[in-house]
Image (cartoon, rainbow, N blue to C red):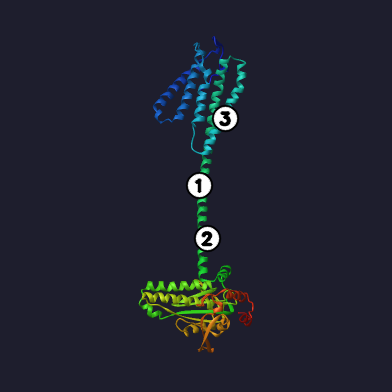
């Protein structure tokens, strides 16, 4: 609707409250058209009011009220002495502002579309301020009522036009930006999910690596496992003095024939688990088990000067454990295993074999001799070679038992290892060393030479 302007009129009607321009045919046509439009909008509103939301009703109501005030303001310009209520146009303006600011009228989803609404609101505010600044210029030429009327007739259409133009022009851009924001949010969400999956995979990989390292340490000595991790391989090493300990159950096959498979494995596992704990306490390294045979060694992969003593102490503990187990089995009327132990000291070559399943092993004549000591021993006894005897004779009670033939070695001396000497034992059993033993052992372990004659004389 075209807004009336003081520049479209000639002459005045003089009323008690103000002067009003004479209206012409154009203004009458505008009034008729406005009334028809008002009626059409009002009819459409009541017909569709069930589908119109609360905020939109506020907007439509404000425009309808404003239109009614403007139409009634046309009557005084045609000689009808109706007090113009257009001076109260601030009422629909307040209603419109309330709808926009309080209830988010014309609001749409999306951050940037909401931004376009704020830009339009800013334009609305700007035009309002401009109208207020322009108001004194109009008031200087017209009365207060007429000035307010002309101000609204001029400024209000400009304000509404500015609001709609800004909103309509910014909306397509806002929608495109919202799509971009949506895609960015989607990519961010995907990135966060991928990052979370990567962290979970990293945690699982670290856990798997820890489990792998634990498994590696279960089958390889720590020093060897570290070298394998760092270099990917283990360099074979020669050790000049290593003590090898073999054990084997006598009558294993016969006893096993009368046992269930699960019972057999549980019994064997219980024995070998106890052996593992004993050799760990005595600084020995488990190498392997073959059937009912158990093999370990001292002095590798870290060389020391006490590996023969360590092996003999471990052998005494194993012997004591098997004797206790035998007594329990006899008391329960159950079959039992008896054990032979053999020990020999000498040089070996050690290394890791296998590509997919690693195994730390030793090779050399020392291994064969230790196995020969075990197979030539007696049930329940510890059979040691002369080389081992020479390293432990000051600590342990031994018994010479003759010679055996060794392949490519001629005759080999053998000794039974019975127990610790009383002066080095905590009790009569001779299985556990006392403080004197530990003091001398500490010196030997550090590489010191002990003058045994002086020790014997002191004791």
> Residue 254 appears at what percent x and percent y?
38, 80
Looking at the image, which residue is at 51% across and 58% down? 203
Establish if 205 lies above or below 275: above
Label disc, if present, on residue 206 of the rendered structure: 2
> Residue 156 appears at what percent x and percent y?
54, 24
| CA gap, disc 2 and disc 1 | 30 Å
Q: Give the class, few, some or many, for how many residues have Cα within 10 Å of label 2's Cα (few <14, many ≥20).
A: few
> Residue 24 appears at what percent x and percent y?
52, 15
Q: Earlier in the sequence, mark 3 or mark 1?
A: 3
Establish if 330 lies above or below 131: below
Secondary structure, mark 3, is helix
Q: Nearer the viewer, mark 2 or mark 1?
A: 2
Establish if 310 lies above or below 142: below
Secondary structure, mark 2, is helix
Secondary structure, mark 1, is helix
Label disc, if present, on residue 123 of the rendered structure: 3
| CA gap, disc 3 and disc 2 | 59 Å
Q: Nearer the viewer, mark 3 or mark 1?
A: 1
């Amino acid at each position: 609707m075209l807004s009336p302007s003081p520049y479209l009129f000639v002459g005045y009607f003089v009323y008690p409250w103000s002067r009003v321009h004479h209206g012409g045919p154009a203004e009458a046509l505008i009034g008729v058209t406005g009334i028809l439009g008002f009626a059409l909008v009002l009819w459409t509103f009541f017909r569709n009011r069930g589908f119109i939301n609360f905020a939109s009703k506020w907007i439509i109501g404000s425009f309808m009220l404003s239109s009614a005030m403007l139409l009634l303001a046309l009557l005084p310009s045609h000689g009808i002495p109706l007090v113009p209520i257009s001076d109260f146009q601030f009422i629909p303006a307040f209603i419109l502002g309330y709808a926009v600011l309080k209830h988010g009228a014309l609001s749409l989803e999306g951050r940037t579309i909401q931004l376009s609404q704020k830009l339009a609101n800013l334009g609305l505010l700007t035009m309002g301020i401009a109208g207020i600044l322009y108001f004194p210029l109009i008031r200087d030429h017209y009365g207060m009522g007429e000035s307010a009327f002309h101000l609204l007739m001029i400024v209000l259409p400009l304000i509404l036009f500015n609001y709609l133009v800004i909103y309509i022009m910014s909306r397509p851009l806002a929608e495109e930006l919202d799509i971009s924001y949506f895609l960015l949010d989607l990519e961010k969400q995907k990135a966060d999910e991928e990052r979370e999956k990567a962290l979970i995979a990293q945690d699982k990989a670290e856990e798997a690596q820890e489990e792998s390292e634990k498994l590696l340490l279960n089958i390889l000595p720590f020093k060897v496992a570290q070298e394998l991790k760092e270099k990917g391989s283990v360099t074979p090493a020669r050790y000049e003095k290593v003590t090898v300990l073999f054990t084997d159950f006598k009558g294993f096959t016969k006893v096993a024939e009368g046992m269930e498979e699960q019972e057999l494995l549980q019994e064997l596992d219980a024995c070998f688990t106890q052996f593992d704990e004993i050799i760990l306490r005595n600084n020995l390294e488990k190498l392997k088990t073959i059937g009912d045979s158990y093999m370990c060694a001292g002095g590798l992969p870290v060389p020391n000067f006490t590996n023969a003593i360590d092996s003999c102490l471990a052998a005494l503990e194993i012997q004591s454990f098997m004797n206790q187990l035998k007594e329990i089995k006899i008391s329960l009327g159950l079959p039992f295993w008896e054990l032979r132990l053999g020990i020999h000291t000498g040089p070996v070559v050690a290394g890791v074999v296998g590509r997919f399943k690693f195994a730390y092993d030793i090779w050399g004549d020392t291994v064969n001799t230790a196995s020969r000591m075990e197979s030539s021993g007696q049930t329940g006894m510890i059979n040691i070679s002369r080389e081992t005897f020479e390293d432990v004779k000051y600590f342990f009670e031994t018994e010479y038992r003759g010679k055996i033939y060794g392949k490519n070695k001629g005759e080999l001396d053998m000794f039974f290892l019975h127990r610790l000497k009383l002066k080095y034992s905590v009790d009569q059993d001779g299985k556990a060393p006392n403080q004197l033993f530990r003091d001398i052992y500490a010196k030997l372990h550090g590489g010191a030479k002990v003058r045994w004659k002086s020790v014997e004389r002191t004791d």
